[in-house]
Image (cartoon, rainbow, N blue to C red):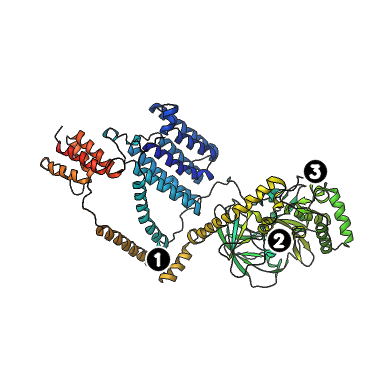
Amino acid sequence: MRLNAKDIVMLVQLLVVLPHAEHLPYWLLLIAIFSILIQLSFVHQRLFTLSLRMQKILQGVVFLSGLFGIFQTFHTILGLEAGTAFLIICLLGKLFEVNTRRDAYVVLTLGLFVTAGLFLFDQGLMTTVLVVLATCSIFYAMMMQNIVVNESQSIQVIRTDVSGVSHYHALKTIFFIVSIAVPLMVILFIFFPRISPIWSIHLNQDQAKTGMSDSMSPGDIANLSQSTELAFRAVFQGPIPANAELYWRGLVLGTFDGRTWSPTKDARLKATQWGTQSIPPWLAHGVTLKTREPTKYSITVEPTQQPWLFALNFPVGEDSDVGLTREYTVQASDDIRQRTTYKLLRFNTQTIDADLPAWLAQDTLQLPENGNPQSRTFAHNLFKQANGNPELYASYVTNWIRHENFVYTLQPPPLSGDRIDEFLFKTRRGFCEHYSSAFTFLMRAAGIPARVVVGYQGGQLGRDGHSLEIRQMDAHAWSEIWLTGRGWVRYDPTAAIAPDRIERGMGALTSQNPTMFGDGLAGTLRYNQFKFFGQARQWVDYAKYLWQRDVVGFDQTRQNDFLFKFLGLRSQVMQIFVMFMIFALVLAIVVFVQLRRKRPKWHPLDIPLINLSRRLNKQGLARNDHEGMLQWLKRVELAGYEHQAKKIASIYRTARYSPDLFSEKESIKEMMMIVRRWRKE
């Protein structure tokens, strides 16, 4: 398969466009692949001839279909996603006009803008790696445009065959450029003042949501728990609590329709305490603390496209954009669209909602009018045995689950009809959502206010030894019931049937219990996959965390602390002054090294052209000191030496910038022969 310089331009555009596939519509990716592949020489030369007329037609089709798709998807060309999609469509349309070196440079420069646009969506480690690879590929493609093998291709240089060219020279040059750019980039990163943005950009509200959803049905959390993707990372300022205490509350689900639990749509539950606002009565009188000494910790959460956050009970947000809801969960002021860090305080409480409002009691007693008759009868009879004591009744239900051959599994059988009845009295195989749903139903059926809480439980110690990694496999659901004098109390029926899940965590349980993934060959394969990718993913996630903490999270406060700690700098004026001084020092070192390098003043390929310059001195065509060799030969060409100047320029360019095509010695010999035979045309 032979490649020309245009093929390299097209293939590089794949590296530019493909990283955008995660946040842009699939149809745009299909248009991009079509527009690029159809112009590759080894495609259209074998299948069909791509004439100039056909190129214009395809260009119009790509642009108009792309514009139509943008308006159908986003209803505008403004905004982050729509604007990026429009820029990519413009790039794809321009690809059909690439015929000369100048066209290639325009397209490749536009590709740099499209590549940089990735940072508008995400500043993570993997995004940075993709941007660096795409940028270096663009630089490589730019260098390959200088290859010309004969004078007839000096205009249509984009068609030059490069399949036999060694890439060492181009890669060496790119490495040299990057080695100079990286130190300058680091200096700017450390010293340049952090300036707040003039405006903010919101991502598309319809982006796919990841992780925990805002409802719970049988099987939802079991499916989520088979993923080892990172949900968030917690760092404590002090000892890490025991695993059994790590209940990361996310959402409270109070409405049940017989199949699905969802948040209660009561406007009074939407009340949220933000930052330093005056404390509302429900918070001032609803919580009694055991101690006023909080545990401080921070959480770095992965993008979810949802506003709710995760915290240990009882939480107080240190950041003004983290709010506490009436159900004592925390949420952000906007959807979490990128990796975000927030700080929290955890207080030990004695009671929460000791005086339950009547409206909230009614909300947390709601059940469908009909359905699950066997469970309702069971609850009524067992509550009688407990003499109407809610705490004793909850203990009876827990013991019944513990001793009635229930099984904790990621692969429960499907349920239909009266799902609570079928689970409690027939299948008795389920995951945490089955147990919490059934337990909460039994509590409400006995007249005890109860609700389901979904979030995560436990965590695994990170590679740094002091942070906790909470993964999707740690997703969990449990119950909270209201008891007189104690308020809301957590009850986790899963602990009755799988105590290791709570005490040691989901990771330890699954790593030692293959049957959790199901029976047979499929279950074994899922288990082996979990074991194989577990440690590798942990290292990758830890690297992402360090990047988020030390690079993306290097805000103005951390910058000021860093510069004061190591250099004693406080004012921004001094920071800028030191930055320019270091810049000057680096540039001085580069200049000094260049001047000290022992190399001839002229490149061997320049010698024939120097001789030619002396020969043309009488005609006033000698090369000026400020002129490059190719620029000077262009002036000579316009002075009446078109054929000879083009030919010697072609040989010089090929030998100078693509030394692998011809030997340097042969090129010098051919150039000297042209100089000796030089005459006016």
Q: Residues within 10 Å of mark 1 (few under 14, many from 20)?
A: some
Determine the CA span between mark 2 and mark 1.
Answer: 50 Å
Determine the CA span between mark 2 and mark 3.
Answer: 30 Å
Would residue 82 be found to the left or right of residue 330 on screen? left
Q: Which residue is mark 2?
A: 502
Circle 2 or circle 1, nearest the eye: 2
**Looking at the rendered structure, which numbered label has been put on residue 111?**
none
Which residue is at 24% across, 54% downward? 599
* SS assignment at label 3: loop
The reply to whether discs 2 and 1 touch (Cβ–Cβ < 8 Å) is no
Q: Which residue is mark 1?
A: 572
Q: Which of the two labelled residues, at mark 2 and mark 3, occupies the earlier sequence position?
A: 3
Q: Which residue is mark 3?
A: 417
* SS assignment at label 2: helix
In front: 263, or 14? 14
Would residue 94 be found to the left or right of residue 548 on screen? left
Q: Which amino acid type corresponds to the residue marked 3 in the rendered image?
A: Gly
In front: 15, or 169? 169
Q: Which amino acid type corresponds to the residue marked 2 in the rendered image?
A: Ile
Residue that protrudes farthest toward the left in the picture: 618
Residue 417: % across, % down = 80, 43
Dividing the picture into quarters, in which one does residue 110 lie? top left
Residue 91 in view? yes
Q: Residues within 10 Å of mark 2 (few under 14, many from 20)?
A: many
Residue 24: % across, % down = 52, 43
In front: 344, or 51? 51
